[in-house]
Image (tube, rainbow, N blue to C red):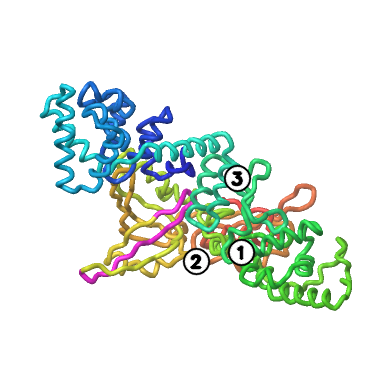
Amino acid sequence: DTVGVFQLESSGMRDVLKKMRADRIEDIIAIVALYRPGPMDNIPRYIACKKGEEEPDYLHPLLEPILKETYGIMVYQEQVMQIAQVLSGYSLGEADLLRRAMGKKIKAEMDAQKERFVSGAVKKEVDASQADYIFELVQKFAGYGFNKSHAAAYAVVSYQTAWLKANYPVEFLAASMTLDMGNTDKLMLFRREAQRVGVKVIPPSINVSGVDFAVVNGAILYSLAALKNVGAGAIEHLVRVREESGPFRSLGDFARRIDAKLVNKRALESLVKAGAFDCLNPNRAQVLEAIESILAMANRAASAAEAGQNDLFGGSASAADDLVLPRRDAWLPMDKLAQEFEAVGFYLSGHPLDDYMKPLQKLSVDTYAAFHEKALTKGARAAKLAGTVTHRQERRSKSGNKFAFVGFSDPTGQFEAICFSDTLAACRDLLEPGNAVIARVEADVEGEEVKLRLQGVEMLDKAAAQMVTGLEIFVRDAKPIDSIAARLSNGGRAPVRLVMLMEQGREVHVSLGNKFTVTPQIKGAIKAIAGVVDVQDL
């Protein structure tokens, strides 16, 4: 449970900690020193000795006090110096020269040190051949040894951050996200970690969010400054305006109070797409279209202020919003999430596949997290996975054939698969970013890493439409009927029923027929229509 913990957050390090069951500060010091190329080979033996599955080898009784803490394994440079002191009578100064010589690997110097080491050990009644053997081991280790003072300082900070995460998880994750607000991959990792431990992440709001990630009622409030194309200076200005005159009451109120020189068009676009204006107007498509009008009003208000003119409305709470908004239908759920992905860097308020989870179970499609676990623990090597395509990076092999790394996202996380030339040629059109697909994959497991190969792809809507189901659409009046008709698609086998909710609890049921194509995307599109009360599966 060390995601975000200093030095201990990589998947490999977390796996080592699970196997080691670290229960003392010395274990953390040792793992910080060992988890690097070279010393890493000693980790399995350290774990086996710690668990009592193997006996430590101290090489000589004189060395047991030095090597006992690390189960007979030379981990630290300080141990090299102590061994030279205790076994061969080196002074501290001589021992430090030995350590430096071993690092440089100069043969003439090492030959002289070996003679000094062995002769000193013989004087202490250590067998010459054993002293020679110990010198060779020390020499081999000294090339990649880590100094304990450094590892100990790291380990203390590791323990402090682990303590903070264990005792103040919400504050810890919020602070970690603030620290890495410029790194989308880290933000997504912390957001997923928050989901895993049951901490809610609230989407950004123009009226409550600030520059940093904040904790509100046990949840993390997303930072406005962490959005793409939005600088900290712009958000500092908005927060200052909000603190001076209270929350923004409308889009017109927002426009009249901001400085258009500090909050530009690109920043406003990201704020809209991320949902920061939902508290003023939940129709993001309409607000995005109104950005030019917002900036024009902001410039007019600034000019009027410079000329000394009073605001006609005086900024009063009862003032009408004189910003004329264009008529625009709200984005469909999938489009809304795609725009959010563009502004945030990952899906924040939901996932495009959320409504597909039940049909996917019927199609025997795994989530990535479930398959990853099965691959590691049960030897699973093939699966069908659903995901939205996040990227496709094409490369050319030495033989000239094209291949690609394709990224996917599902509600449990993000994953990547390699796609070789034949599959790429057959599926390239389907592997466009934003497409929702079902991917057939094969897996290779290397340690704790699961590497995926793409074997085939099909569009998710096409597969889901084969799972014949129907819809029951609840409305209170006839106003949304035309919009519902525009969203429904003929040519399938699914029945659709309209339910009119009348006064006194009465209902009128109208069958629209059973020749419709129904997918979770169509269901979500109908559910988003103004005037539709609910949409349920038949």
* Image x and y of residue 287, in percent: 69, 68
Q: Which mark is residue 491?
A: 2
Calculate the distance from the C-alpha at mark 2 to the C-alpha at mark 3: 41 Å
Calculate the distance from the C-alpha at mark 2 to the C-alpha at mark 1: 49 Å
Task: Give the residue at x 34% y 68%.
Answer: 394
* Image x and y of residue 206, in percent: 70, 59
User: Observer-nearest residue: 343 or 327?
Assistant: 343
The amino acid on which the numbered mark 3 sits, given as a three-letter code, is Lys
- Give the residues in magenta: 399-415
Count of picture labels: 3
Of callouts 2 and 1, the N-terminal one: 1
Q: Is residue 476 magenta?
A: no
Which structural element holds mark 2? strand
User: Observer-nearest residue: 247 or 176?
Assistant: 176
Task: Give the residue at x 10% y 29%.
Answer: 129
Task: Give the residue at x 63% y 53%.
Answer: 212
**Among the 4 quarters of the image, the one containing residue 458:** bottom left
**Among the 4 quarters of the image, the one containing residue 336:** bottom right
Is residue 499 visible to the viewer in this orientation of the structure?
Answer: no
Magenta region's main secondary structure? strand
Kindly identify which residue carries mark 1. Answer: 231
The amino acid on which the numbered mark 1 sits, given as a three-letter code, is Gly
User: Observer-nearest residue: 61 or 428?
Assistant: 61
How many residues crowd around disc 3 within 10 Å: few (fewer than 14), some, or many (20 or more)?
some
Image side of residue 253 versus residue 377, left or right: right
Calculate the distance from the C-alpha at mark 3 to the C-alpha at mark 1: 25 Å
**Among the 4 quarters of the image, the one containing residue 135:** top left
Q: Is residue 286 positioned above or below 467 on the image?
A: below
Kindly identify which residue carries mark 3. Answer: 200
